[in-house]
Image (cartoon, rainbow, N blue to C red):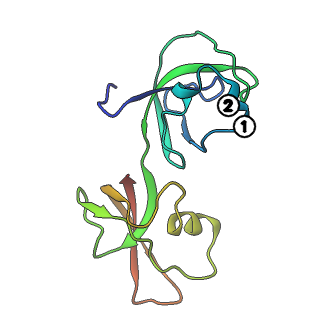
Amino acid sequence: MEDMDTTITLIGTRLAKEGAEFFFDGETPECEQCKLKNTCMSLEKGKKYRVVKVRNDTLHECFVHDKGAMVVDVVKAPIFALLDSKKAIEGSKIRYQAPKCDEKLDAETYELCYPKGLRNGERCTILKVMGTVEMEADPSVTLKKVELLP
């Protein structure tokens, strides 16, 4: 799968598998001394990525990953979230706005209300509209689970 939004980077060998997804948390103090730092730091901090291609089996020394790092191609990965049902239109481009969620949520619903890697005001595309989620605190609010690509 070649994608024009593909980025070449280095990741730990344990994650260097096609289809693996991860959040890029940014530079660590150990990265400061690495000669390959610029290749690793080409990703956007806080964003979710998917490995689409492992470039080769060459192992690079890494001060962060105990088994070294490998060169891979990555793309931004979709994020699942909840949206107001009126805004949940497949294929539309929106500025993400987190919904008002109940105070007491199970872990899965909490992750959908406050998705990691997605900020209010960020532009994204709605890839898929899924099921409906009703909030107990306000039954008049109907939310849809959606798959978004920032």
Q: Position of residue 70 (x, y in %)?
A: 58, 19
Amino acid type, label 1: Pro
Q: Are marks 2 and 1 in contact (CB under 8 Å)?
A: yes
Disc ID at residue 149: none
Pick the front one: 27 or 59: 27
- Characterize the local packing of mark 1: few (<14), some (14-19) or many (20 or more) Cα atoms within 10 angstroms: few
- Characterize the local packing of mark 2: few (<14), some (14-19) or many (20 or more) Cα atoms within 10 angstroms: few
In the image, is residue 120 above or below residue 84? above
Residue pointed to by mark 2: 32
At a point 61% along the width and 82% down the height, the residue shown is: 103
Amino acid type, label 2: Glu
* Circle 2 SS class: helix
Pick the front one: 136 or 91: 91
The quadrant in which the N terminus is found is top left
Q: Position of residue 14 (x, y in %)?
A: 66, 26
At a point 54% along the width and 57% down the height, the residue shown is: 116
Residue pointed to by mark 1: 29
Q: Judge from the rendering whether residue 2 lies leftward or rightward of residue 35; answer left or right.
A: left
Q: Position of residue 18 (x, y in %)?
A: 49, 26
At a point 38% along the width and 66% down the height, the residue shown is: 121
Q: Position of residue 15 (x, y in %)?
A: 61, 29
* Circle 1 SS class: helix
In the image, is residue 23 above or below residue 40? below
